[in-house]
Image (cartoon, rainbow, N blue to C red):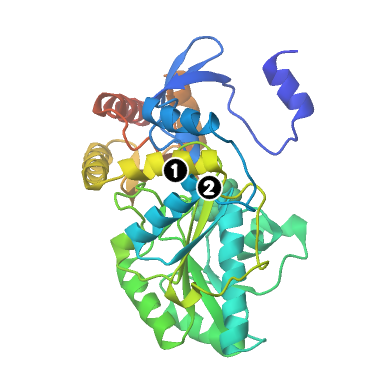
Amino acid sequence: MSIRELDQTYVANTYKRFPVEIVSGKGSLVWDSDGREYIDMGSGIAVTSFGVADEEWQRAVIEQIGKVQHTSNLYYTEPCAKLAEMLCTRTGMKKVFFSNSGAEANECMIKAARKWAAENKGADCFTIATLTGSFHGRTLTTLAATGQAHYHELFQPLTPGFVSVDAGKIEQLDEANAKTSLAAVMIECIQGEGGVVPLDPAYAKALADWTKAHDVLLLIDEVQTGNGRTGALYAYMNYGFTPDAVSTAKGLAGGLPLGATLLGERLEHVLGYGDHGSTFGGNPVSCAAALSVLSRIDDDLLADVRRKSQWVYDALNGAPGVESVSGMGLMIGVKCTKPAAEVVTACIGRGVLFLTAKDKVRLLPALNIPDEALMKAVNTLKEVLAE
Ligand SMILES: *Cc1c(COP(=O)(O)O)cnc(C)c1O
């Protein structure tokens, strides 16, 4: 059997894969099993922050693999401790819990919020409001948090304690809070899977003020928007939020599994011995990779992400076949006059791998994508859209 046939026979049929078998890559280029070259505009969904097989990233990983690849959380390791310090120093958050994925980073954030609310506001205060159109993960609890009913239908009953509100409508928070005392509001600054939809800054400010006034926690899901993706280290920094907790994963370790839940002052001491745990979480190899990734996301790199973003906006705004452009930094959604899936398929045929998000073509290239590759990919998109 071919790899495609093997995969289709033996791998659970949860993914509709593109007809491309990727065998290797370098930076923002990947090669398939026929030796065809593609420009990678998806980075494995915002994961390979510095591209494929980046040398500096490889050195960090290989060095740690040669020392110890796993210890369990019964022992101290340097990469875990140093990464937690770096995350706290660069965000002002106080403590970090490490896991392996975005869903798990959100699970921890939800558990911390529930425990805080039970202890500070009473046992019947556990409900978390999330936004319509949000995406928070695939576990039963993060699915419940996800504000898109079509993900829920086949998996009832989901974890109780979540309510959906529409972005832009503060009065819906008042209504939800009157019905059942809210523990927290959980948001993405830019909805990723929901279609690259940024939060309106006026609503963001009103939301932050509302949570403060009502003693409700503000939880930010930075699984996709984090780690330099939007031109700030974390997207909440673009909005001037002071979150009580931040979750992140995808790009954090540049291609190895790692989730992190950052806890602010109010949640710093909420999790105690035995309250939460993970066998793989804080794995030294993933943490060494993340230390390497984060140490490269400095002011110069972030300025470069914003410069590239502006160039993409200028190139696509008003171009034939483009209805609108949304997003921040190198997390960009393009609403096209043609169906997004068709556009992505046509671009694959011309050697560029884009993603979709709802009805948009989504761009999530490596943060260090060379200008030339970025321009070539965007020009290919423009050609396909103009036809
Ligand atoms: C991808 C994503 C998740 C889920 O992350 P996994 O690593 O797939 O569990 C959660 N929240 C947001 C905003 C995401 O983009």
Seen in the picture, residue 322 relative to 9 is either above or below; the reply is below
Side (left or right) of 313 relative to 183:
left
* Residue closer to the observer: 81 or 109: 81
| Numbered-mark total | 2
Seen in the picture, residue 179 relative to 191 is either above or below; the reply is below
Would residue 18 be seen by someone viewing this image from the given angle? Answer: yes
Check disc 1 and give the amino acid type. Ala
Distance, label 1 to label 2, CA atoms, is 14 Å
Q: Residue placed at 58% from the left, 20% from the top? A: 21
Side (left or right) of 160 relative to 167:
right
Badge 1 local density, few (<14 within 10 Å), some, or many (20+)? many
* Residue closer to the observer: 321 or 125: 125
Q: Which mark is residue 133?
A: none
* Residue closer to the observer: 117 or 214: 117
Q: Residue placed at 44% from the left, 25% from the top? A: 53
Q: Residue placed at 36% from the left, 81% from the top? A: 209
Image location (x, y in percent) of residue 32: 52, 16
Seen in the picture, residue 18 relative to 321 is either above or below; the reply is above
Which quadrant of the view contains residue 206? Answer: bottom left
Check disc 2 and give the amino acid type. Thr
Which quarter of the image is occupied by the C terminus?
top left
Badge 1 marks a residue whose secondary structure is helix
Would residue 336 be seen by someone viewing this image from the given angle? Answer: no
Image location (x, y in percent) of residue 5: 73, 19
Badge 2 marks a residue whose secondary structure is loop
Which quadrant of the view contains residue 309? Answer: top left
The residue wearing badge 1 is: 290
The residue at label 1 has a CB less than 8 Å from ligand 1? no
Q: Which mark is residue 77?
A: 2
Image location (x, y in percent) of residue 303: 21, 45
Which quarter of the image is occupied by the N terminus?
top right
